[in-house]
Amino acid sequence: MVSPRASARGPKRSGHGGELGAEAYLEAIYVLSQEEPPERVVAARVAEYLGVSPVSVSRALTRLEKQGDVAARTPTIQLTEQGWRRAASVLRRHHLAERWLEDRLGLSLVEAHLEAERIARALSDRVADALWEELGRPTTCPHGNPIPGVGVHVPAEPLAVVPPGVYVVDRIYEQLENVEAVLIWVEEAGLLPGSRVRVRGGPAGGTREIATLGPDGEEKAVYQVEPQIGRRILVRLPDPPDRSE
């Protein structure tokens, strides 16, 4: 089975159907700054990520600059310290809402992500802190991405470039979460954080052939993962077996 194409994400609507608020742009810039090379964090990329027009992005960046959240936006967008704090708060609330929706309410990855988009911005930082405690102080969202302020970055590499071998799925980049068809495929294929996969072949940077593995290491299903997706699924080597017992 071939993975679906990771196209640009669709429009992200505000709760009232109007233009996106500042928090949506701050979150987008934060995510792109974490997941893309610095030279890629430009206005056109933000427009593509959010599914809005370049004019809307230009207006938003002007507002953010006046508010002290953006220090520079030509040629690349740079957040100020204040902008980083605000963006991290937005993403933290989103991750915690996803955790609550999946861990406590049993929603799927896709459902949790979509619902978190609707409710996360209504949470105050105080409520987010309480939710974090109630959930047992998680360090990642359900997709494996570190929660700002508490998450730990584990060394991991894109599935698209690792050599053949057995790996553990570490995390799914935010950019894939926003392409619903891809996130559904990821969940159905079982490419969730903590699952084991074998990279069977395919050129580094190209389409990779992988197999998902069962508890005993047996191959359950084989998939062709396109590079647009393979670049945004991070994997790591399995932990060495515990020989203390």
Image (tube, rainbow, N blue to C red):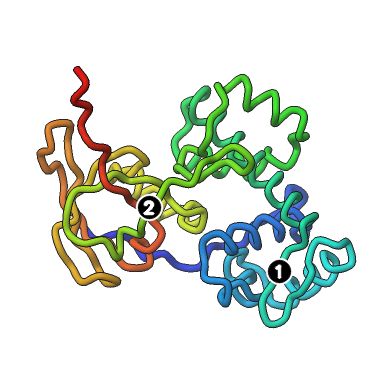
Q: Quadrant of residue 194?
A: top left
- Report the residue marked by disc 1: 78
What is the quadrant of the N terminus in the image? bottom left
Q: Is residue 230 above or below residue 14?
A: below
Report the Cα–Cα distance between label 1 and label 2.
Answer: 25 Å
- Tags 1 and 2 touching, CB below 8 Å: no
Looking at the image, residue 84 sits to the left or right of residue 35; the answer is right
Classed neighbour count for the residue bearing mark 2: other residues with Cα under 10 Å, few (<14), some (14–19), many (≥20): some
The spot of residue 237 in percent (x, y) is 27, 47
Type of amino acid at the residue the image marks with label 1 = Gln
Which residue is under mark 2?
156
Residue depicted at 28% across the width and 44% down the height: 168
Can residue 21 be seen at all in this image of the molecule? no
**Left or right placement of residue 223 versus residue 13 in this view:** left
Residue 7 in sight from this viewpoint: yes
Q: Which residue is depicted at the point 29% across and 65% down? A: 161
Mark 1 packing: few (<14 Cα in 10 Å), some, or many (20+)? Answer: many
Can you say which quadrant of the picture contains the C terminus?
Answer: top left
Residue positioned 35% across, 59% down in the render: 158
